Amino acid sequence: DLCPQLGITIPVGKDSLSMKTSWEDDEGKQSVTAPLSLIISAFAPVFDVRKTCTADIKPCAEGSTLLLIDLGQQKNRIGASALTQVYGQTGDVGPDLDDADLFKAFFVAVQQMIGEELLLAYHDRSDGGLITTLCEMAFAGRSGMHCDISGLGRDALSILFAEELGAVIQVSNLNISKVESLLAGQGVNGICHVLGQPVADESLTIIYKNNQVVSESIVDLRRAWSETTWQMQRLRDNPQCAQQEYDLLLNNEKPNLFSRLRFDTDEDIAAPYINRQRPRIAILREEGVNGQVEMAAAFERAAFTALDVHMSDILSGRVSLSEFQGIAACGGFSYGDVLGAGEGWAKSILYNPRAYDEFSAFFNRDDSFGLGICNGCQMMSNLYKLIPGAENWPRFVRNQSEQFEARVAMIEVLESNSLFMQGMAGSMMPVVVAHGEGLVEQRNASAEQLLEQQLACIRYVDADGDASEYYPLNPNGSELGLNGFSNDDGRFTIMMPHPERIFRSVQNSWQSKTWGEYGPWMRIFRNARKWID
């Protein structure tokens, strides 16, 4: 009934609403009924990813207010909620969508607010209820809150834990009247309530009818919120890494993501070469590689002609690397990492005469360059005997956490010969990591020697900008935080993180307001174009 009222269709779904099997054995008739579940997949276009709103509480010079838009209209039904679940109950009446027209009006109003940039933060009320919504907003923004829920219902417990539809929004005090007028204009009346304000101290205080029902440290709440994950993680993963991540929650003073750049992201150092002949770069991939599209896009934006080259093209002789000035070996899982990350890919080169000769000739040219990212980094590190000046490159093995790591980490660019990193030394910025085998294992040189020889070009850092071996700031545990290297003359660079995934500012899950259209990692691709001329 709901979909026609909302004017939407369900493209695909899976239900387990009637899964039952019956049989008969020596003990008589038996049956098993699966738990009821319904999964509906839906999607919608996002016309401008810059017009989005995140849940983290934002600082606001003129002050801000937290508002609850209560689509449950104070029914506060707690049946089937997380609260009842932890007490082994199901409750009585569960929340529901009672008014489809109100829901549509709410959606349209929120879209208008986002379009007019009236919202500082937005978070839906769902699993765990209002208390969880507030906590998650506070955790994300590292902010305290002072709220009064006296006008939201008959008892504090149901107000805080009911999982009714609704949302909490943070609005500048200068825009509250605009938000209220916009809601009224859409027919959303009588369900927008003032909750309270963000506060500087790191505590969550909730008042109900002059009684303080919650008064807790944000740090303590976040530790409690994360404890179940920590307990499971220390049994499944490396317990030392699990403990380090859990203890990191005690530090709520400094942001884990920041931007300190020694260059201007708006400066396009490749601009003088746009109208010249575009150099050709081979975007290398193998079975299981999946990062070629982002890599090609980044080099195309830096005035290259990026061409898709599969290893089968080289092995068969259809394509020769002599046709290219650069190669970029992309990330993924070549051969499923069965022979070790990147090692199967490397051996397909080392033990095939045609491929061996092609790559050896390419690496020994004076005008060639190359970039290896993630799986491509692992592959190229195993070709160190073919690459002049790469004899001290390490290999990459299983992460110290014993898990695949997909997260955002902070990187410092080091002084090095890498042509990709020129003019960036000392800069610190976020980068995406996604690998299971990124831990550096030294071959012929120690981490200290790689630093002294300026062969290390990036390292993971903490909130103070110091090199970090602490998990998850250093997602794989590499010594001194080193996770990217260049050869002696700087023409070939390998690194485990993924700069090609975030060369545009909007591709980042967090971005600095000082960045323009392009993020800081676009500079490495422009550096490559500048190096050619």
Image (tube, rainbow, N blue to C red):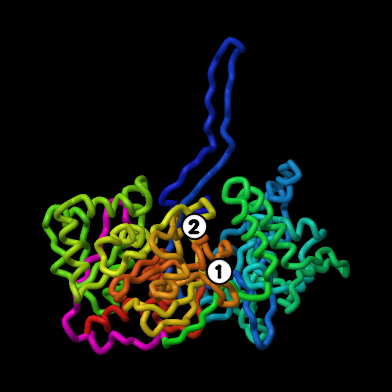
Residue 195 in view of the camera: yes
Q: Position of residue 525 (x, y in %)?
A: 32, 76
Which residue type does callout 1 highlight? Answer: Ser
What amino acid is at disc 2? Glu
Left or right position of 138 against 119: right
Residue occupying the point 33% across, 86% down? 268
Position of residue 351 measured from the top left corner of the image (x, y, whole percent): 21, 50
Q: Position of residue 468 (x, y in %)?
A: 55, 69
In the rendered image, is residue 109 in sight?
Answer: no
Q: Which residue is mark 1?
A: 468
Q: Quadrant of the C terminus?
A: bottom left
Q: Which mark is residue 405?
A: 2
Q: Residue furthest right?
A: 210
Total numbered labels placed on residues in the image: 2
Query: Do residues under tags 2 and 1 come within 8 Å of each other at their CB atoms?
Result: no
Q: Is residue 185 within the magenta segment?
A: no
Q: Secondary structure at mark 2?
A: strand
Q: Name the spot of residue 459 as percent of width and height, x first.
A: 47, 71
Q: Which residues are magenta?
A: 265-291
- What residue is rendered at 24% in x and 51% in y? 348
Which residue is at the front of the view, 266 or 192? 266
